[in-house]
Image (cartoon, rainbow, N blue to C red):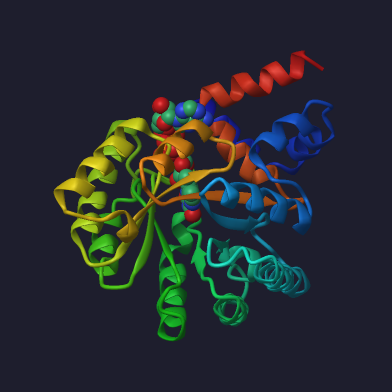
Amino acid sequence: MLRSVILAASRSSRVERLVETAPFTRDVVRRFVAGTATDDALRATQELVTNGLSVTLDHLGEDTVTAEQAVAVRDEYLSLLAALSAAELTPAAEVSLKLSAIGQKFDEKFAYDNARAICAAASEAGTTVTLDMEDHTTTDSTLEILAKLRADFPTTGAVLQAYLRRTESDCRELASAGSRVRLCKGAYKEPESVAYQAANDVDKSYVRCMNILMSGQGYPMLATHDPRLIAIAEDRARWFDRSPDTFEFQLLYGIRPEEQARLSADGYTVRVYVPYGDEWYGYLMRRLAERPANMAFFARALVSK
Ligand code: FAD
């Protein structure tokens, strides 16, 4: 119930204005978002890489409605990639991209062209791109664009969401040699017709999908903070005889940093998803919807100000 309310609020511009101007907001945002400028993103990346972690950077923003906005997002990624390369932070750092931020909602061909330019710049910088997955109405389009991008940039990463009923089948399709696939639970509010609703069913689907990816030929990127799923992943790595360079764990910036360090110290590749930029509102609200403890953090920030 609380999750539905927060996810609804994440789409409300009135609530957005209220939250953005609230005095406690800055502290809450700082926990989950690296900052607003490219330099902030570079600083956070440098610190994580120095500590032995890999990074994927997300320039915040989604559901772009004009071509000018989409081009501005594309250009931000191009300059980010140039800056990462100049700072010698590639290939440790790659980028995550939401197709809706570069025009997918109003012109798929235009979004593909923008994504292609970003993949070319990533390749030039010695790194790669992962296409974030958004709500289920975009899944087919995103996977089609992914397939086209992979023809020229085979390391372009996919994201699959365990809460979708279709995902086991998508995992089978994508578990081929060289295929980088991030598996996450899924962050959007989806109808029962397409998505498991009970947390336990989502977890069971995650394990089935993980089995397919870990037993396949591709490069699984296991994105979760869930201690049970991380333990199962460690077990499957032993079971399927996967060395640490053949898969990775991924966690979000600011979430379970001790676990990030623990996994890294145990020899696993750990990639931290680092969001930055002005448009942090939708991202932050999804993080709050995921976990009551994040709400408590929010509330503590509110009363301490
Ligand atoms: P949850 O069900 O949220 O939590 C399970 C358990 O994990 C909790 O019970 C608790 O024990 C532990 N836990 C969780 N959070 C914390 C915390 N803050 N502190 C301590 N313990 C905690 N979603 C998409 O839809 N599309 C994407 O492209 C996408 N990309 C992602 C990339 C990365 C790297 C990650 C990590 C997530 C991504 N997500 C994406 C979000 C994802 O779908 C989930 O919404 C999010 O990760 C929460 O699910 P969870 O697996 O962490 O488990």
Is residue 300 shown above or below 131? above
Residue at 50%, 65% in the rendered image = 131
Q: In the current view of this chain or complex, which residue is farthest to the bottom?
A: 152
Q: Nearer the viewer, residue 217 or 270?
A: 270
In this rendering, position of residue 281 left or right of residue 52? right
User: Residue 133: in sight, yes or no?
Assistant: yes
Quadrant of residue 174 within the rendered picture: bottom left
User: Residue 166: in sight, yes or no?
Assistant: no
Is residue 161 shown above or below 181? above
Q: Nearer the viewer, residue 17 or 86?
A: 86
Q: In the current view of this chain or complex, which residue is farthest to the left?
A: 239
Residue at 51%, 70% in the rendered image = 128
Residue 230 drawn at (x, y percent)? 33, 38
Residue 65 drawn at (x, y percent)? 71, 65
Is residue 28 shown above or below 237? above
Is residue 269 shown above or below 1? below
Residue at 48%, 58% in the rendered image = 133
Q: How many marks?
A: 0
Quadrant of residue 287 within the rendered picture: top right
In this rendering, position of residue 233 left or right of residue 9? left
Q: Nearer the viewer, residue 291 or 77?
A: 77
Residue at 41%, 70% in the rendered image = 143
Residue 290 drawn at (x, y percent)? 50, 33
Residue 29 drawn at (x, y percent)? 71, 36
Q: In the rendered image, which quarter contains the C terminus?
A: top right
